Amino acid sequence: MDFIKNFPFFGIMLTMLAAIISLPMHGKMAKRISLFVFSVETLLAAAVLFYTLQTGESFVYIMGHIGAPWGNELRAGVLEGLMACFFSLVMLLSITGGSKHLILDIEESKRNFYFVMTDLLMGALLALIYTNDIFTAYVFIEISTIAACGILMIREIGRTTLAALRYMIFSLLGSGLFLIGIVLMYDLTGHLLMQNMRDSVELLVSEGQFIIPLTVAISLMTLGMAIKSGLFPFHFWVPDTYGYSTPASGSILSGLVSKGYILILIKIYCRVIGWENVTQSGITDVLFVFGLAGIIVGSISAIHQNDIRRMVAFSSAAQIGYIFMGVGLGTSAGLAAACFHVLCHAITKPLLFISASGLSDASEGSKLFRDLQGSGYRNRWAGLGFTVGALSMVGMPMFTGFISKILFASASVQVSLGKMLPTLIVLAISTVLNAVYFLRTVIRIYTPAERELEVPVRIKWHEQRSYVVVLVVFVALNLVLGLLSQYITDAIQLGLTMFS
């Protein structure tokens, strides 16, 4: 069983090796390699999750057998195993579900490059989940930024090039702020490994030394990751980035990449700074305010869209607000709710993006609401998938979005009235706003079309087998998280305990 301790390292290196092998390959072969690797990653992460649940302890993998303070380490616990398992599975499903549009949107000579980028992106996400070294985290943040820009701009239309440029500018700004924060932390502590930094931070706090520089460092790292994940008011790059990319890329960027940045920030809060020190600094209060604002602004912006992909993209900005609101509550319950919503959003947004592409295909390629009328009948599987995703985001019982909102509401009643009331009010308002734009869309796609299409379309099961399987799996995952949430939340709570 101890051999499982090697799996985090194997997972990261396997993706890097796949990227190298795929580079000279034909697009089809590169795709097969990537799908195989993502399948193996899911199994490796599931084994790590099972092992840490059985032992009840996290473990450290020392790379090159060189210990602290000069060596590099990976660290895995229940939360890391859970996130890595979900991320690998969502990556696998997103690529499979968006395969049709990868062929349509990307030149044949460049398809292998797309899978090289997804391999690098998966490796970067796994490294962010497992790393125990803060500078290594920065390196893989940059790798994920470059790979994300690659899968975005590979669809060569003017809007994706502009979106990639805007995304790159915001991402580099966030990365630069994060790096400055790391430099300050290294200057204060003399360490890069997280546990060593934590010991030094605790000593500084207990002696009352360098509190202001420490707060500045935390603030810079927080600001950097907030920009990169799309928290209000830094969400302006979100609609073009998610809305004009291929469905697979939109699913990956929305469901996974932004969550990787949030996870590394939570890891720094718990494992480097100390959760109590973060809450005492007042940073969580600032995140709470901007999280609430992001929920409302993102939802209102989604209502005003007439393009289904941009509507889902603006909804993502609102969902990022939920996560930062949970972190901003400043309690372990709020943190657990935020982590659960990371999983909720990671499986629901790809479901919505991939379903929206199917509805568009059944509407002569149009993404405008007026042309999508009746598309739920023309592509029944896409209609079903979008309906389930929409109901989950609204917060209907049985689905994972309902559990997220219950967890946020439960966490809010454990804090002061000054945070409890705004949380409950915003949750209520956002639920109404979500219902306005999501249920309106569901009604639209199931309203009989006013005109017949020039070329009648009715997409059947045998024409989209892999697409339907992906939608069914995403729907099943949504139900599993909704109906078996207690097991997931218990695992998250245990993982957060190991985190500290």
Image (cartoon, grey):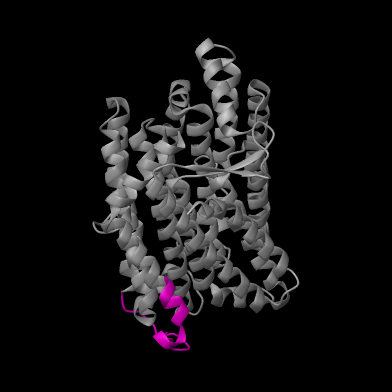
Horizontal relation, residue 4 to residue 401: left or right: right
Please name whichever residue, 251 or 368, is drawn nearer the observer in this view of the structure.
Answer: 251
Residue 407, relative to residue 88: is it above or below? above
**In the rendered image, which quarter is residue 14 located in?**
bottom right
Is 469 contained in the magenta span?
yes
Q: Seen from this angle, which residue lies furthest right?
A: 24
Residue 240, given in percent of the width and then of the height, sits at 57, 56
Residue at 42% of width from left, 59% of height from top? 347
| Number of numbered markers | 0
Magenta span:
447-470
Up-down: is 63 above or below 213?
below
- Determine the residue positioned at 57% across, 12% down: 209
Image location (x, y in percent) of residue 237: 58, 50
Residue 453 part of the magenta-drawn span? yes
The one nearer the camera, 424 or 415, is 415
- Report the residue that reaches farthest toward the left: 397
Residue 315, horizontal then vertical, whole percent:
43, 53
Is residue 94 or residue 272 the one in the foreground?
272
Q: Main secondary structure of the magenta part?
A: loop
Q: Percent x, y for residue 253?
A: 55, 56
Is residue 96 at all visible to an observer of this figure?
yes
Left or right: 41 in relation to 117: left
Examine the rendering and report whether any part of residue 460 can be seen.
no
Instruction: Say left or right for 230 vs 112.
Output: left
Which quarter of the figure has residue 223?
top right
Residue in view at x 42 percent, y 64 percent: 352
Q: Is residue 146 placed above or below 499 in the rendered structure?
A: below
The residue depicted at 46 percent of the width and 86 percent of the height is 463
Q: Report the quarter where the C terminus lies.
A: top left
